[in-house]
Image: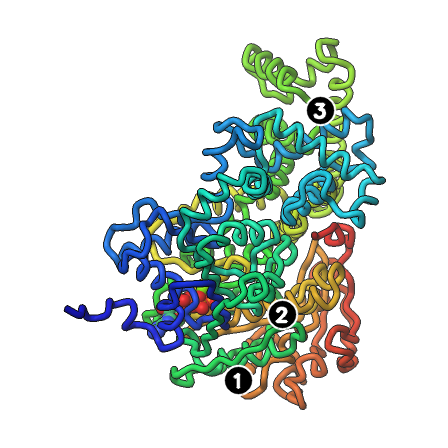
């Protein structure tokens, strides 16, 4: 007897249903944001199980984050009951790890291999540099690490790295890479890139193993396909060769991980690699109102390299996208806080609100505001500002500065950055301190008079003690923010992150700058340290309702009723670093990020930009982001500026052909903070030169080097 169609099929539109029902052969679902790609993937998974086309263990489903994998598992469980035991559902790394554990011996590892974290990886590279008699200063370990990671992203083993990369590290790059990989094997260890790379080796050198998995995985499903890198792509292609039942869903307009080796080209190659592939396009958006969608589509249309697609929605018109100018970052945080309180009064759940920032350091102002007004928040995919590693390190320096006997803080920084102090020295120091019932610093002062410590380490420690003495003297004479900068510079802490070529490093440097900005809100170190201690004390309970704070990158795939998008200013967004490093491609990736941000919103998107930013204790005048000009006028509502902001002829009167944010500009200026010497802001209307250059004068932030450090 014919059963009624299962629930998940009923809840799909025609195109979606087509994708779910296409169960034989390769399938690419290429569609814009909010069109139900992830829903299709989940339904398809459920449907395969329901129709008993495969056992759970014969299905491989790859998501971008562990969180997404958990959610997918829950959703499938809900649909088909608990028949999901044994599914291969996880991230690329998670699944590659699982496979590699089973066959470790075949690539020269033992099954209990360890996965190295960043620090281990660096220590290893450092040892190699030493062993090779090279100079760490010329060849910073972090620089090497960055290059090695990129090679692994591209699936390149030692000996396979391209000629064009061989000039790297004075021609020693490929050689060091080989040594590094050999050393990892000796240590029975893998870095993250290895998980994939070893899988590829395994498959290419052991035909029968490859066949086993090719045979096993009857169905392969991949979400966020636009952000796969070359190694991941090769891995998928190998595994799909037998059954060819691979279904990838993605959106070229949401490819935002180019800086981490993702290749949007993987989408474009799909049809070539899997001849006869079916392509399904979804055009109906179920998430956002027409205004939000219109604004997002208009914006992304400015990108040249895209496949192009139409989106429509049946939802009611709703609010236009709000664009609001504010005076500075504090006012922006206040404004967002006020809006959130208003929404709360209208009974909107905090869980339905999110603030999406371009860079991690931007969360700080909002966090402080929420703590002040008592709004609960979570930082998704990251730590709260004061919990971040570099912030804790820096604060530890300030604590030791203020309180030499603060052993916990001292311990945190004594060998950060690495000063070549070994375990044994530290152990001796601890023992002596315990024995004498004194602090580490006090003990150290004594110890330095003796010759119990080896000369090299003695010198290092003496220098550190002298440094602290000097900084303490300076702290009585100079403004605390300046002392803070001096400490972070002279201790080598800033340098440590400047040398770091990992993708996270620039963000950490920005956080440090933001920390200095935060400091300037307080009269002195003591006041600031008290504040931090109190802030750190507030605990959020897990299941309470909370506003989400996260980066635009972290928001991929998610949706909220109300989205706040602060900081739409040139340099910040699009980020200067992206433009400097990657030119037009960088700009287009930034624009895709803006598209991702806008399309997270169901009901309302609220963009803001400030006239002034304090960066590293300096006030900087900001230019509204060019992306504002690219939003189609009919979908945007310019909010009158709030109280403090008095940009007289500012936005409201300047609506010209385009929105005219840039032409109108801010005429209001004033001296605020010590470093701000803003005089008349004299905007030249923007010259559209292929949309990539702007003509306007922006005062550069003072410590250029800090942001100038590389990205990948
Ligand atoms: P993104 O590109 O942002 O990852 P997506 O294409 O994966 O988006 P989904 O997250 O799957 O889109 O779906 C967006 C929203 O639309 C979800 O709330 C989903 O439940 C809803 N939705 C999708 N398809 C339908 C449908 N046929 N009927 C009703 N709601 C739907
Ligand atoms: Mg999705």
Frontmost of labels 1 and 2 is 2
Kindly state the secondary structure of the residue where label 2 is placed: helix
Residue 374 place in picture, x, y as percent? 41, 57
Alpha carbons under labels 1 and 2: distance apart: 17 Å
Could you tell me if residue 224 is visible in this image? yes
| Disc 2 residue crowd, few under 14, some 14–19, many 20+, Cα 10 Å | many
Residue 347 relative to residue 397: left or right = left
Answer with the quarter of the image where residue 365 lies. Answer: bottom right
Q: Position of residue 180 (x, y in %)?
A: 69, 32
Q: Secondary structure at mark 1?
A: helix
Which quadrant does ligand 1 occupy?
Answer: bottom left
Q: Which residue is mark 3?
A: 420
Mark 2 sits on what residue? 591
Q: Which mark sits nearer the N-terminus, 3 or 1? A: 3
Which residue corresponds to mark 1?
635
Identify the colour scheme used: rainbow
The correct choice, above or below, for 457 with respect to 478 in the image is above
Q: Residue at x 46, y 82 (%)?
A: 312
678 left or right, relative to 300: right
Mark 3 element type? loop
């Amino acid at each position: 007897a014919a059963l009624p169609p299962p629930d998940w099929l009923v809840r799909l539109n025609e195109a979606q249903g087509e994708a779910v029902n296409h169960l034989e052969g390769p399938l690419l679902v290429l569609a814009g944001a909010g069109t139900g790609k992830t829903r299709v993937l989940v339904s398809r998974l459920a449907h395969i199980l329901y129709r008993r086309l495969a056992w759970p263990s014969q299905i491989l489903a790859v998501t971008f984050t562990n969180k997404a994998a958990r959610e997918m598992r829950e959703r499938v469980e809900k649909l088909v009951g608990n028949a999901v035991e044994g599914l291969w559902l996880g991230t690329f790394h998670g699944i590659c790890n699982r496979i590699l554990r089973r066959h470790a011996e075949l690539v020269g590892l033992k099954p209990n291999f360890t996965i190295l974290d960043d620090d281990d990886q660096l220590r290893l590279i450092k040892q190699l540099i030493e062993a090779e008699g090279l100079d760490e200063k010329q060849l910073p370990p972090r620089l090497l690490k960055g290059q090695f990671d990129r090679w692994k992203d591209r699936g390149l083993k030692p000996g396979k790295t391209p000629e064009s990369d061989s000039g790297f590290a004075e021609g020693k790059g490929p050689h060091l890479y080989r040594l590094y990989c050999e050393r990892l094997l000796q240590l029975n260890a893998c870095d993250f890139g290895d998980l994939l790379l070893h899988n590829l080796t395994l498959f290419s050198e052991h035909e029968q193993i490859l066949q086993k998995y090719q045979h096993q995985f009857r169905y392969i499903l991949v979400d966020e396909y636009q952000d796969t890198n070359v190694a991941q792509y090769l891995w998928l292609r190998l595994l799909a060769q037998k059954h060819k039942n691979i279904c990838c869903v993605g959106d070229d307009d949401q490819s935002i991980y180019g800086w981490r080796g993702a290749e949007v080209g993987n989408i474009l190659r799909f049809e070539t690699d899997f001849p006869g592939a079916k392509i399904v396009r979804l055009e109906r958006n179920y998430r956002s109102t027409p205004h939000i969608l219109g604004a997002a589509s208009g914006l992304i249309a400015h990108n040249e390299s895209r496949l192009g697609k139409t989106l429509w929605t049946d939802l009611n018109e709703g609010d236009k996208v709000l664009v609001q100018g504010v005076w500075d970052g504090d006012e922006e945080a206040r404004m967002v806080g006020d809006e959130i309180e208003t929404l709360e009064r209208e009974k909107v759940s905090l869980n339905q609100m999110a603030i999406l920032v371009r860079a991690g350091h931007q969360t700080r102002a909002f966090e402080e505001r929420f703590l002040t007004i008592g709004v609960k928040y979570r930082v998704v995919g990251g730590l709260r500002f004061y919990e971040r590693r570099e912030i804790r390190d820096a604060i530890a320096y300030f604590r030791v500065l203020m309180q030499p006997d603060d052993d916990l803080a001292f311990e945190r920084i004594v060998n950060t950055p690495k000063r070549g102090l070994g375990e044994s020295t530290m152990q001796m120091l601890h023992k002596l301190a315990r024995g004498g019932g004194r602090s580490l610093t006090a003990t150290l002062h004594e110890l330095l008079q003796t010759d119990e410590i080896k000369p090299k380490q003695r010198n290092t420690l003496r220098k550190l003690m002298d440094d602290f003495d000097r900084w303490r003297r300076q702290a009585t004479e100079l403004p605390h923010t300046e002392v803070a900068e001096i400490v972070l510079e002279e201790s080598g802490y800033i340098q440590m992150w400047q040398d770091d070529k990992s993708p996270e490093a620039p963000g950490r440097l920005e956080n440090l700058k933001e920390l200095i900005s935060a400091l300037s809100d307080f009269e002195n170190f003591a006041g600031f340290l008290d504040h931090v201690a109190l802030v750190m004390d507030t605990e959020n309970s897990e299941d309470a309702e909370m506003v989400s704070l996260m980066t635009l990158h972290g928001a991929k795939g998610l949706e909220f009723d109300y989205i706040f998008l602060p900081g739409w200013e040139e340099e910040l967004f699009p980020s200067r670093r992206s433009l400097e490093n990657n030119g037009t491609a960088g700009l287009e990736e930034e624009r895709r990020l803006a598209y991702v941000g806008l399309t997270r919103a169901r009901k309302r998107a609220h963009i803001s930009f400030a006239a002034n930013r304090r960066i590293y204790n300096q006030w900087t005048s900001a230019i509204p982001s060019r992306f504002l000009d690219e939003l189609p006028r009919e979908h945007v509502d310019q909010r009158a500026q709030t109280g403090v902001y008095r940009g007289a002829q500012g936005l409201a009167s300047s609506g010209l052909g385009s929105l005219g944010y840039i032409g109108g500009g801010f005429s209001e200026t004033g001296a605020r903070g010590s470093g701000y010497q803003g005089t008349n802001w004299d905007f030249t209307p923007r010259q559209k030169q292929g949309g990539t250059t702007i003509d306007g004068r922006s005062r550069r932030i003072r410590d250029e080097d800090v942001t100038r450090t590389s990205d990948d």
